[in-house]
Amino acid sequence: MKREVNVWSEGTKLSGDLFIPDDIKSGEKRPTIQLCHGWGGPKEHLNATYAPFFLEAGFVCLTFDYRGWFTSDARLVSEEVQGEPDEDGTLTLRVRPVRDVVDPFDQYHDIINCLDFLVGEECVDTNRIGIWGSSFGCGHAIYVARTDARIKCLVAQVGGAFQGPLIDSPLSTQRATEKARGEHGVLPPLNDGHESLAGYPDYAKMARYWTDAEKINIPTLLMDQQDEDLFDRTVQLPVLYEKLKDKIPASYHTFPGKHYDIYDKNFKASAQMARDWFVEHL
């Protein structure tokens, strides 16, 4: 059973889909998985792949689109001087919708608010919530697993561990200064876009987005593509695994092929591995 839901995240409406096993009984609570796609990946992809796969194993699942992407509303930002509110406390302003911007802090808070939503669902066992993240969402899943005690199990694949800034460069410093001084408005410059990815990264935010991932204390499965072509995988998940393996239940596995092969030719094997990890540890 799939139910369309709205999740409110910092005042912006996110479009989500809640998957609930058909055999669930009234009052029964099930282990639950929060799914986090990469960069600006659509929930519709997860709805056709990972969510139904995990659903078959009896898990409740939530998918969603990040704010400003696909079917979710955009964050609205005013570039005008606000002035004084009317007698009823409202303001009338021209606002700009912020869409297709990869802001890691916005996306992190979207995930946290999705978890807040899940806690309010009768069928969710709040003591057995896991998180799954892929690509850019891999780092989000790691970040949330480190910072939110509600997460009891982690599966993260084909992405950075975020043990240092995502982009730590003179450009990120320049963009942060330009944004604070109002020199390029609320949207990143169009030429900051990645040649092979949709949308525009907020370099100023990415320089400040990282966590001490080695302090994760829950069962953790990490998966990579052997011939990863979007970043240097050898300094990411394998390094994190070495720091975790002697402290918690942890596993690291690679599949043959490049980044996007995890979603097609290696989908069944990687999804099965993830599902088995959740079955064992949730």
Image (cartoon, helix red, strand yellow):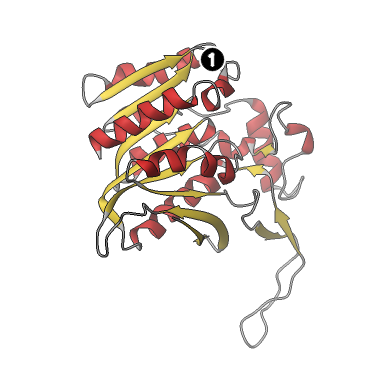
Relative to 87, residue 200 above or below? above
Task: Tell me the residue at 54%/41% (across/down).
Answer: 48
- Residue pictured at 62% horizontal, 25% vertical: 169
> Which residue in the rendered view is the most extreme toward the left?
247
The foreground one among 227 and 51 is: 51
Q: Position of residue 272 (x, y in %)?
A: 38, 28
Q: Is residue 189 visible?
A: yes
**Residue 144, position as x, y percentages in the image:** 39, 41
Residue 140 versus residue 60: which sits nearer the camera?
Answer: 60
* Residue 215 in view of the camera: no
Q: Which of the image's four quarters has the N terminus?
A: bottom left
Q: Residue furthest front?
A: 23
Which amino acid type corresponds to the residue marked 1 in the rendered image?
A: Asp
Q: How many marks?
A: 1
Residue 249 appears at what percent x and percent y? 23, 26
Nearest the viewer among 22 and 183 is 22
- Relative to residue 153, is residue 89 drawn left or right? right
> Does 72 sit left or right of 245 as displayed?
right
Quadrant containing the C terminus in the rendered view: top left
- In the rendered view, does 19 fall on the left or right side of 198? left
Instruction: Examine the rendered structure and indicate whether residue 53 appears above or below residue 228.
Output: below
| Residue drawn at x 34%, y 27% as measured from the top left | 221
Q: Which percent across, then down, holds residue 128?
A: 26, 47
Q: Is residue 143 above or below residue 78?
A: above
Q: Secondary structure at mark 1?
A: loop
How crowded is the residue under tag 1: few (<14 C-alpha within 10 Å), some, or many (20+)? Answer: few
In the rendered image, the residue lying farthest to the bottom is 87
* Image quarter of residue 104: top right
What residue would you read off at disc 1? 232
